[in-house]
């Protein structure tokens, strides 16, 4: 079983991980902004349609896309990011599904973000490219505990910090890695930033996320801090393709 919460204590839900739906994966989470609404069929709405098309077209070859459509009050900015190990075809499927789901889950909202295992999609009437997103964030963790939380947390922090140092100097702003940790076997980690960030801001974003490990995932066998600009995940089993 896995749990998740938006930031620390806003709310807490638990759910059972079901077998992955083969047709379309379910979102991990979404946040609909309260900043403003558009009207069905208006110019903003058709700009948003175009933006979704651009992101789903531009995203898969590199795993990342930025797009802006329209002018002044009808302008909409968006980005899509696939997990760094996801193949182009799955990336395209994820972004297209995200574009459909976000409009169902956040109807008529001028800003929203949605996360899946394989991708994230965010759009807004406000300009947000190149800025660390500190407001959209949630945690997920495996409810099972390890026996020695303090030593385990240190190992997790060590691996994730090492990956953050690799990711921020890589063009992909993405890194995965594993580390043998004794009787628990191997620890697997993944870190990634959206590529509108500079390397320095990617590092800053990841360092902040990693510093939240004690609130998120203290002594948990697996966990994630997932934001609009960066995320990490660790598990005691392999969960990414190499
Ligand atoms: C947007 O729509 C929601 C739901 O209809 C409403 O509660 C909210 O006040 C609206 N927000 C703005 C900024 O108009
Ligand atoms: C894990 O530890 C927490 C905090 O000590 C406890 O509340 C929880 O019940 C434990 N979970 C399991 C599955 O044993």
Image (cartoon, rainbow, N blue to C red):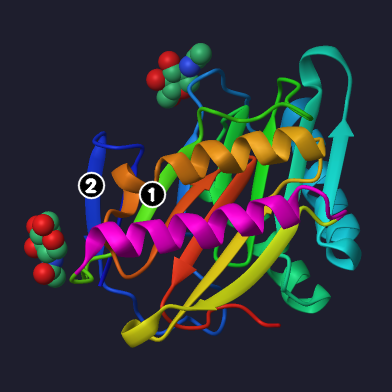
Task: Give the residue drawn at x 78%, y 77%.
Answer: 87
Q: Nearer the viewer, mark 1 or mark 2?
A: 1
Q: Does residue 163 belong to the magenta stretch?
A: yes
Quadrant containing ligand 1? top left
Q: Is residue 226 visible?
A: yes
- Label 1 with label 2: CB-CB less than 8 Å: no
The residues colored magenta run 148-171
Q: Is residue 8 above or below residue 143?
A: above
Mark earlier in primary sequence (1, 2): 2
Please, what is the dominant secondary structure of the magenta stretch? helix
Q: Does residue 45 belong to the magenta stretch?
A: no
User: In what element is the residue under mark 1?
Assistant: strand
Task: Give the residue drawn at x 78%, y 29%.
Answer: 130
Disc 2: which residue: 12
Disc 1: which residue: 139
The quarter holding residue 218 reads: bottom left
Q: Is residue 203 above or below residue 165?
A: above
Task: Give the residue drawn at x 78%, y 31%.
Answer: 77
> Which residue occupies the foreground of this view, 152 or 104?
152
Q: Would residue 221 appear left or right of 22 to someone viewing this image?
A: left
In the drawing, what numbered circle is on residue 216? none
Rendered location of residue 132, percent (x, y): 66, 29
- Quick one: quadrant of the N terminus? bottom left
Q: Is residue 46 visible?
A: no
Q: Residue furthest top?
A: 72
Mark 1 lies within 8 Å of ligand 2 (Cβ measured): no
Rendered location of residue 62, percent (x, y): 88, 62
Rendered location of residue 190, percent (x, y): 59, 64
Q: Is residue 146 above or below residue 40?
A: below
The quarter holding residue 42 reads: top right
> Which residue occupies the foreground of this view, 46 or 176?
176
Rendered location of residue 133, percent (x, y): 61, 30
């Amino acid at each position: 079983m896995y749990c998740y919460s938006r930031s620390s204590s806003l709310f807490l839900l638990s759910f059972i991980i079901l077998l992955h739906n083969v047709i379309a994966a379910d979102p991990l989470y979404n946040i609909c902004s309260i900043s403003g609404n558009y009207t069905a069929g208006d110019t903003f709405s058709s700009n948003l349609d175009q933006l979704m098309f651009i992101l789903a077209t531009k995203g898969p070859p590199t795993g990342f896309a930025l797009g802006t459509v329209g002018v002044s009050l009808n302008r909409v900015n968006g980005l899509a990011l696939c997990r760094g190990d996801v193949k182009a075809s799955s990336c395209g499927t994820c972004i297209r599904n995200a574009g459909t789901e976000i409009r169902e889950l956040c109807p008529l909202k001028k800003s929203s973000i949605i996360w899946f295992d394989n991708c994230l999609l965010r759009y807004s009437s406000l300009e947000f490219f190149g800025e660390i997103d500190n407001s959209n964030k949630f945690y997920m963790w495996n409810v099972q505990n390890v026996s020695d939380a303090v030593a385990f947390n240190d190992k997790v922090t060590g691996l994730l910090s090492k990956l953050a140092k690799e990711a921020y100097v890589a063009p992909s702003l993405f890194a995965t890695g594993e580390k043998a940790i004794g009787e628990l076997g191997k620890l697997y980690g993944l870190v990634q930033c959206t590529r509108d960030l500079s390397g320095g801001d990617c590092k800053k974003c990841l360092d902040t996320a990693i510093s939240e490990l004690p609130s998120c995932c203290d002594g948990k066998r697996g966990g994630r801090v997932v934001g609009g600009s960066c995320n990490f995940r660790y598990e005691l089993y392999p969960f990414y393709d190499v």
